[in-house]
């Protein structure tokens, strides 16, 4: 039987490869929410400030550990040697450790403050305005210049300045799409014109690269905070305009299809009390706008992949998927609203309709 020391020795021998493996694990994977590959001017600015601070701290680390190693070796206990002399009131040393950090802090402070002012600059002419409204627990995106409203999936054109106006319909949320930069708070102020309103937070940036960037709410906002995701689709101006066109003129389901049946059920159910779908009488404003829902990547703000089966599951019992969701299920109500009482067949028809959008 190995002694305690032998066992400790065995574990100690495994430690260095385990640490190295752990470090290298950081080099694997896609990391869709990295801040190190920014795709906006705003993100690049933050990343540059981060790099600046990082290298200053590395310099401090090298100096501190260098001096420490020197002291440990140079002044180690030797048999018969007298204890090292102690230093008191050394003006030169005291000047060095006061002025050194002051110098470093100045070098970090100046670009940081410059950066803060830069990111709060008023947006320029031709800016696309998006209102990002946080809700428990989903995102509403409004394009007031184009009268388009969508949810959870934000489409943005590449190369055009964008102003995201941040607000909330209930509690504090925080808009964070790491590759775009940020994050910044959504305060519970009503959406609307931003002119002359100091209570708005805004993000101003230009996206330089087409792609799909994921993000999430970054402030604890209740039970399903961790399930409040979003996705940004940055696309060319032509693709963005095509998307806007689709949002204005969504397709209607073919007559006699399951989707058409689903539309009829949707429009006569309580669904329309909360949801709007462009081109139909459904104009509810409380829940997410469902126009072209079939094109979105997910159901329930990133909780489930967007498939007919998942959508049906969501309609049947949203609370089972997202605890605390304000949408009533078929059997159970929510937030003071009664259950929808849709049958299994009706749920499947409604799911088929929404997927057809
Ligand atoms: Cu919204 Cu956390």
Image: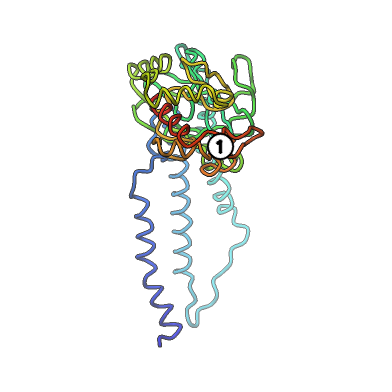
Quarter of the image where the N terminus is located: bottom left
Element under label 1? loop
Q: Which residue is drawn at 47% across and 13% down?
A: 146
Q: Position of residue 13 (x, y in %)?
A: 37, 73
Q: Which residue is drawn at 38% across and 30% down?
A: 39
Q: Which of 86 and 289 is in front in this view?
A: 289
**Residue 256, quarter of picture:** top left
Residue on which disc 1 sits: 329
Q: Position of residue 77 (x, y in %)?
A: 49, 76
Q: Position of residue 249 (x, y in %)?
A: 41, 14
Q: Where is residue 25 in the image (x, y as percent from the top left)?
A: 36, 54
* Total numbered badges shown on the rendered structure: 1
**Residue 356 vertical placement versus 348 (above, below):** above
**Residue 188 vertical placement versus 314 (above, below):** above
Q: Which residue is drawn at 34% across and 27% down?
A: 209
Is the C-beta of the residue carrying label 1 under 8 Å from the nearest atom of ligand 1?
no
Q: Which of 272 and 132 is in front in this view?
A: 272
Badge 1 crowding class, 10 Å Cα cut-off, few under 14, some 14 to 19, many 20 or more, is many
Q: Nearer the viewer, residue 221 or 196?
A: 221
Q: Which residue is drawn at 59% across and 30% down?
A: 186
**Residue 98 vertical placement versus 233 (above, below):** below
């Amino acid at each position: 039987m190995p002694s305690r020391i032998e066992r400790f020795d065995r574990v100690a021998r495994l430690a260095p490869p385990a640490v190295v493996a752990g470090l290298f694990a950081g080099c694997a994977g896609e990391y869709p929410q990295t801040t190190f590959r920014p795709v906006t001017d705003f993100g690049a600015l933050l990343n540059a400030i981060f790099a600046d601070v990082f290298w200053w701290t590395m310099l401090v680390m090298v100096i501190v550990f260098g001096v420490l190693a020197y002291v440990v070796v140079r002044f180690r206990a030797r048999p018969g040697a007298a204890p090292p002399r102690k230093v008191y009131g050394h003006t030169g040393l005291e000047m060095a450790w006061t002025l050194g950090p002051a110098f470093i802090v100045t070098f970090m402070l100046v670009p940081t403050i410059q950066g803060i002012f830069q990111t709060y600059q008023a947006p320029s002419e031709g800016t696309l305005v998006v209102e990002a409204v946080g809700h428990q627990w989903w995102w509403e995106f409004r394009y007031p210049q184009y009268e388009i409203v969508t949810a959870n999936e934000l489409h943005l054109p590449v190369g055009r300045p964008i102003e995201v106006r941040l607000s909330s319909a209930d509690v504090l949320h925080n808009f964070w799409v790491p590759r775009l930069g940020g994050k910044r708070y959504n305060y519970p102020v009503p959406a609307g014109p931003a002119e002359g309103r100091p209570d708005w937070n805004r993000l101003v940036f230009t996206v330089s690269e087409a792609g799909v960037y994921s993000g999430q709410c970054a402030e604890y906002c209740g039970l399903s905070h961790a399930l409040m995701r979003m996705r940004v689709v940055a696309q060319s101006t032509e693709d963005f305009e095509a998307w806007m066109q689709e949002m204005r003129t969504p397709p209607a389901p073919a007559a006699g299809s399951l989707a058409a049946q689903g539309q009829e059920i949707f429009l006569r159910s309580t669904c329309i009390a909360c949801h709007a779908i462009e081109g139909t009488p459904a104009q509810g404003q409380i829940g997410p706008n469902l126009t072209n829902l079939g094109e979105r990547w997910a159901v329930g703000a990133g909780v489930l992949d967007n498939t007919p089966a998942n959508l049906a599951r969501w309609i049947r019992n949203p609370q089972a998927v997202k605890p605390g969701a304000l949408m009533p299920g078929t059997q159970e109500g929510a937030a003071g609203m009664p259950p929808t009482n849709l049958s299994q067949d009706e749920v499947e028809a409604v799911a088929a309709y929404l997927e057809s959008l």
